[in-house]
Image (tube, grey):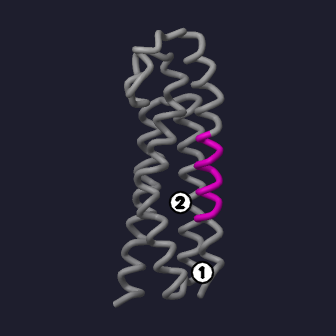
Amino acid sequence: MNTEILAPAAVLVAWSLVMLLWMAATRLPALAKLDLPPEKSRGGRGSDLDGVLPDEIQWKAHNYNHLMEQPTIFYALVMIFAIGGAAHTDIWLAWAYVALRVIHSLWQAVVNTIPVRLSLFVISSVVLVVMAVRAVMLTL
């Protein structure tokens, strides 16, 4: 098994946990300041806080949610490469994807202008598509 390809996945997992902590560190104090009555604080979802908490606080939560979405495809691809044998190009692509996702996270959590964020998303998606094509080629 090629374990070198697992390193980028491990880093993205760790980064996702950093975003979780950042989200909690900003969101929990903001929620405490709202002083919501108990009947208003039951059974809600994080997205229910859009428009309640300041946008800058919610940006971290939005990004954390994004890290639970598209990167699941990345994790599956990494496992395919780990089992089937990753070439150096595959490892480079995996690191590129992780770097782009970290930059995307920082941009969304701090600045959050759509043109740059969309560009980062599109570029990382292209990297993911290239990885997927290479994984199909590897397994056929």
Residue 67 vertical position relative to residue 59 in the rendered view, above or below: below
Disc 2 on helix, strand or loop?
helix
Q: Identify which residue is drawn at 59% across, 57% down.
A: 12
Q: Which residues are magenta?
A: 9-20
Which labelled disc corresponds to residue 88?
A: 1
Report whether 108 appears left or right of 125. Answer: right
Q: Quadrant of the C terminus?
A: bottom left
Residue 90 vertical position relative to residue 30 in the rendered view, above or below: below
Marks 1/2 in contact by CB < 8 Å: the verdict is: no
Mark 1 residue type: His
| Location of residue 39 in the rendering, given as x and y in whole percent from the top left corner | 40, 14
Point out the tag, 1 or 2, that comes first from the N-terminus. 1
| Location of residue 36 in the rendering, given as x and y in whole percent from the top left corner | 49, 11
Determine which residue is flagged by label 2. 97
Name the quadrant containing residue 94. Answer: bottom right
Mark 2 residue type: Tyr
Mark 1 surroundings: few (<14), some (14-19) or many (≥20) residues within 10 A: few
101 drawn magenta:
no
Q: CA distance from mark 1 to mark 2?
A: 14 Å
Report whether 36 appears left or right of 50. Answer: right
Name the quadrant containing residue 8. Answer: bottom right
